[in-house]
Image: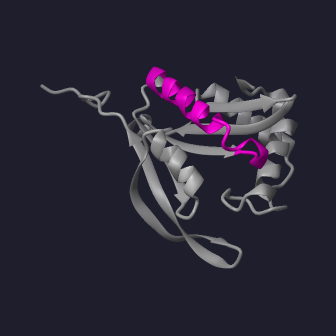
Amino acid sequence: MVYRTLSAEDAERFWNLLNQLDYETKYMLFEPGERPKNLPKTESLIRYSVEVDDFLLVAEADNKLIGYISAQRGMLNRIAHSAYIVVGILADYRGKGIGTEFFKRLNVWAEEKGVTHLELTVICENEAAKRLYTNSGFEIEGIRRKSVCVDGAYLDEYYMAKVKQIPVCPGFFSD
């Protein structure tokens, strides 16, 4: 198992991973067949992630991308300490510690970059993902009621976050 960052040359392989995840799980945002194959846009997403110092990591086995985790930081100063997380792992590779390793590496990145608020959403019925997130230090902060429609049914999502306490906000100066 290899964990690594992406380069623009990985765009088609990354798109293939995302597309396969769309077919394998109902818990990702795109429905099967809904994701447009726009490789320049995928390349741009990868380049942007590198340029702005966001977090985008993949797991690779047998020369195949099998999972990813991304953390997109807030672009404005008031939310630059915060990042939104998305993670996906192919069905054949779930339950093998990949998600746990992703979150360990995410925590190192967050510490290095001064990111103190990590957040994500998860479909309430997705027990495996909730367990991974809880074991990684995330807590449920609220419920987004009927926030997604899957297979003709509205589903609720948990809003989860991991918050590292720091004494003072960066940029806050007292007299």
Q: Which of these two is toward me, 30 or 52? A: 30
Say which residue appears at 72% left-offset and 39% top-offset: 67
Q: Quadrant of residue 140?
A: bottom left
Decide whether residue 95 is among the magenta residues.
yes
Looking at the image, residue 126 sits to the left or right of residue 41; the answer is left
Say which residue appears at 51% left-offset and 49% top-offset: 131
* Quarter of the image that includes the C terminus: top left
Residue farthest to the front? Answer: 96
User: Start and end of the magenta stretch?
Assistant: 89-112
Task: Tell me which secondary structure the magenta stretch mostly adopts.
Answer: helix
Give the image location of residue 14, x and y in percent: 80, 38
Looking at the image, residue 154 sits to the left or right of residue 138; the answer is right
Position of residue 28 relative to residue 151, above or below, is above
Q: Quadrant of residue 166?
A: top left
The total of numbered circles placed on residues is 0
Position of residue 103 relative to residue 35, above or below, is above
Say which residue appears at 78% left-offset and 45% top-offset: 92
Q: How is the image coloured?
A: one colour
Give the image location of residue 26, x and y in percent: 70, 62
